[in-house]
Image: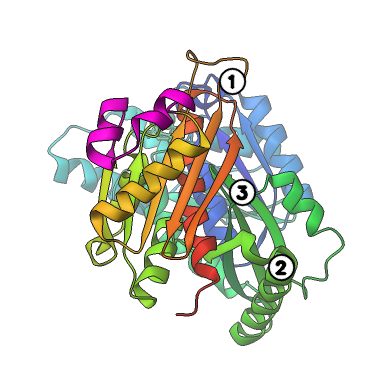
Amino acid sequence: MKIEIVTTGDEVMQGVIVDTNTAWIAERCAGLGHEIVRQTAVGDDLEAIGDALMSAAARADCVIVSGGLGPTADDLTMEAAAKAFALELVRDEIVLDGIRAWFERAGRPMSKSNEKQALIPEGATVLENRVGTAPGIHAELGGADVFFLPGVPKELFQIFEDAVFPWLHERARTACAFKVLRCFGIPEASVDERLFGMDLFGARLSFRVKFPDILLKLLGCGQTTMEAQRSVDAAAAAIRGRLGDIVYGEGETSLAEVVGDMLLKRRMKLAVAESCTGGLVCSLITDVSGASTWFERGVVAYSNRAKEEILGVAAEILRINGAVSEEAARAMAEGVRRTSGAHIGVGLSGIAGPGGGMPAKPVGTLFIAVATPEGTAAHHLSIPRDRQWFKQMAAATALDLVRRELLGRTA
Ligand code: ATP
Ligand code: MG
């Protein structure tokens, strides 16, 4: 079903409040496999609301409207709808009694203006509001089913879940299934390029960047849940085939979780020696519940003295090659591996900026080394962005390098 969402309110237009209602409604509708074809926001203006309602109703099968059902002078949605569609608004005594009862329960006097909330278009269905005064309204207008909901989120949610969602659910022709593939290591545009022209077995693919990850969301629809799931699974397998180990996981799984799982299966432990990331790698690792089973220790060795004293990095290396060098990163990785007894040691050293850059080693220079029982691999990267970006990208890259190292080892 084609659905449009219309949000009303000067506060939304002026950016005073963020329109979270639209996002929430859209997600619920899309989850049922309905298609959101347009989202419109208009101010508290009779003509603008009327226009938006008429054009949405002309295009879509269903229109969901948020806001402007309150009692005050700026609550104009029903009046605008009545004008636009030449409707008669009639006072609904049951609704009015309900509003009166609500005020009684709340121990507050009802004002005259609340009576306005009992004005319902002729022939429309009233949708009970259990948490506030303004009921929702369902009316057939201009060839579409239009749902009017209050702007207050908790009232909107309740009426939507009680009345609108079941209605939409009945009309969801199809069953749907989702899958999210999590990628790391290449830019969004490159992922897109690699997937160009792919057969996705009827599934729909959308990209989302959740820095530093790229999420590929697959939506598959079919007559049955099994058919929908099959379409999504086939598309996911095809994408994995193209992207290979750029896809590190699915759903909500973080890179650190994936690394942890791999270490656990191989009965290995990890130790980390960080400089420029200041402990961020360890923070990502310890975000994972149960990390103690595979994470041995982390060291933040910021100064040269710390690198020498804690990790046993040779003073020579620091003097000749510098703290930011392949040699230093190697020595850090090997040092933390040796002193901890872990199977794998990781060392990071770089220049996060904005200060501290040199012609030979500009801001963004990063060395990551991964030490294993078989030897040490060092990587030279360049991440010339702001400090936070640098740290996050560097930390995620370190985890990803460990993941890639583990991919080559059987579980
Ligand atoms: P009321 O009876 O409170 O006037 P209403 O149905 O007329 O309800 P609005 O006046 O449009 O709704 O909005 C009431 C409040 O609800 C706003 O002040 C705001 O806090 C919240 N709200 C309205 N629209 C949105 C939206 N699109 N997203 C999130 N919150 C919203
Ligand atoms: Mg209002």
Q: Which residue is mark 2?
A: 239
Circle 2 Cα neighbour tier, 10 Å, few/some/many (<14 / 14–19 / ≥20): many
Residue that carries the numbered disc 3 in the rendered image? 208
Q: Residue at x 28, y 59 (%)?
A: 295
For residue 102, side relative to residue 255 (left or right): left
Query: Would you say 242 lies left or right of 335 here?
Result: right
Residue type indicated by callout 1? Pro
x, y (%) of residue 175? Answer: 62, 77
| Mark 3 residue element | strand
Mark sitting on residue 270: none
The residue segment tinted magenta is 300-323
Q: In this view of the protein, which residue sits in the foreground, 261 or 178?
A: 261
Tell me if the residue at label 2 has its CB under 8 Å from ligand 1: no
- On the image, the x and y values in percent for residue 310 come to 23, 39
Q: Amino acid at mark 3?
A: Arg
Report the residue at 45% width, 40% height from top.
329
Residue occupying image coordinates x 77% and y 76%: 201
Disc 2 + disc 1, Cβ < 8 Å:
no
Q: Image quadrant for the N terminus?
A: bottom right
Is 10 situated above or below 65?
Answer: above
Element carrying mark 2: helix
Q: Would residue 197 be visible to someone looking at this image?
A: yes
**Is residue 2 placed above or below 408 in the rendered structure?**
above
Marker disc for residue 362: 1
Residue 196, placed above or below residue 109? below
Question: Mark 2 or mark 3, which is nearer the start of the sequence?
Answer: 3
